[in-house]
Amino acid sequence: MTYKNDYILSCRDIYKSYPMGATKLEVLKGANLSITRGEFVAIRGASGSGKSTLLHILGALDMPDRGDVFFEGKDIDSFSARQANEFRNKKIGFVFQFYHLLDELTVLENVLLARMAHSSAVDWLACSAPAKSRAHQLLGELGLSERIAHRPFQLSGGERQRVAIARALMNQPDVILADEPTGNLDSQTGSGILEIFEKLHSVNQTVVMVTHDEKIAARAQRVIRLADGRILTT
């Protein structure tokens, strides 16, 4: 199914619930959202409002009970398993509150994982040199050149989040989806992470960030409020 519009990412009438014993917890109740290419959008809502669930559905990490999600006008529900994997790996860059880095790997190896994930052994032999060059470049731009051989447990929270951002950017994604990216950081460190997103936005990177914090949301170009499973403002 194709939905003709000018949005890079959008959703229509999204419903999502989870079983809670004999009952269901209704998290999203008809959410509608449209993101224009190059926007920096914050989705703000209290804990339990459904904002992380919505972000995961936009990135095809979860599926709605009903409703449609469109990427460049194409319904992602119509994607094959291979297309869905490519969408998550190449078109979307994920940044999470708790980083999701692998402590057994170095900083450089964690960033390279994003590229290795969709490469066969033969493909990796051909692309490893330019991939390593890009990883070094990203880590340098994020002030991590001296941490390349370190492991995540040797880094501060802010450094770990910058590694996660480098990993998210590795495949030059169309959209960055950030789930409470400053939620595990102090205010000064968190402000530095937001400056990175602002810089990315200045070069036309699409960023969608969820947060419960009004001050953090205000750093975005546009703020959307989510309450009781519904979008209240766009």
Image (spheres, rainbow, N blue to C red):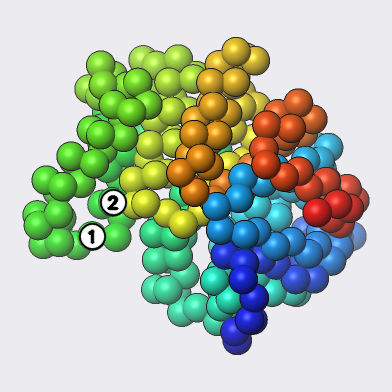
Residue 215 pos. (x, y %): 76, 26
Which secondary structure lies at badge 2? Answer: helix
> As drawn, which residue projects farthest toward the bottom?
1
Q: Is residue 71 above or below residue 164?
A: below
Q: Which residue is mark 2?
A: 115
User: Which residue is at the front of the view, 156 or 232?
Assistant: 232
Of 102 and 163, which appears nearest the observer?
163
Secondary structure under badge 1?
Answer: loop
Q: Position of residue 50 (x, y in %)?
A: 78, 50
Which residue is depicted at the point 60% across and 13% down? 188
Horizontal side of 4 relative to 138 (left or right) equals right
Q: Residues within 10 Å of mark 1 (few under 14, many from 20)?
A: some
Image quadrant where residue 89 sits: bottom left
In the foreground, 218 or 115: 218
Residue 93 x/y as whole percent: 46, 49
Total numbered badges shown on the rendered structure: 2
Q: Residue flagged by tag 1: what amino acid is it?
A: Ser
